[in-house]
Image (cartoon, helix red, strand yellow):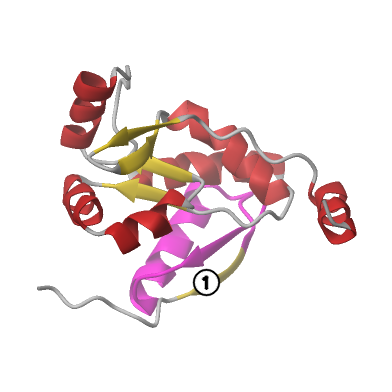
Amino acid sequence: MSAVAIHDAEILGETPEWPEKRELLGVRFSVAGYDDLIDPILEAAEQRRPTIVDHMPTAGLVEFGRDDALRKVIDAFDVVAADGQPVRWALNRLCGTELEDRVYGPELMLRLCEQAADRGISVYLYGSRPTVLEKLHANLLERFPKLDIAGVNPSTERRRPR
């Protein structure tokens, strides 16, 4: 281990313990529900550790399952949550997981914002259009008055529907 890596480890602390992953059609999914993800994600935020969380619906599973290059990218993500019910059903049936529910992105965001407000962790809103972010910003502060929103930034690249 280099001195820089040791120094970084000392600053950042221990890496959060991410849920185990199981492979479904070539894609490695996190075996996790909402409660399994909140603490490690917020721990990473407290440590200012870059973290990537994805919510994979059925269409994403099909697309990533067919594309080796995309699969290599998503394999590096910290969390790949089963967003779609069919994905959850397949993980349970084919991979022996016992996931009780899918992990819907907007629901996880609300739960994370609630906990972030309670713990004094700031959040940053990225993506979508400016008008959507303005409404989200206002709605989150109305729902969680103690939430510290450090900033907002609309995404500049938009995928065109096929």
Q: Position of residue 66 (x, y in %)?
A: 19, 55
Question: In the image, what residue occupies the spot 85% across and 57% down?
Answer: 2
Q: Position of residue 21 (x, y in %)?
A: 43, 33
Crowding near pointer 1: few (<14 within 10 Å), some, many (20+)? some
The residue that mark 1 highlights is 152
Question: In the image, what residue occupies the spot 39% across and 78% down?
Answer: 130
Question: In the image, what residue occupies the spot 18% across and 78% down?
Answer: 160
Viewer-closest of 69 and 52: 69
In the rendered image, the vertical position of residue 103 relative to residue 71, given as above or below: above
Count of numbered labels shown in the rendering: 1
- Left/right placement of residue 31 relative to residue 10 reads left
Q: Position of residue 78 (x, y in %)?
A: 51, 46
Q: Is residue 82 magenta?
A: no
Q: Amino acid at mark 1?
A: Val
Q: Quadrant of the C terminus?
A: bottom left
Viewer-closest of 39 and 14: 14
- Left/right placement of residue 43 relative to residue 114 reads right
Q: Secondary structure at mark 1?
A: strand
Question: In the image, what residue occupies the spot 23% across and 46% down?
Answer: 57
- Left/right placement of residue 41 relative to residue 53 reads right
Q: Quadrant of residue 81?
A: top left
Magenta-tinted stretch? 121-149
Q: Residue furthest bottom?
A: 156
Q: Is residue 144 magenta?
A: yes
Q: Position of residue 122 (x, y in %)?
A: 65, 56
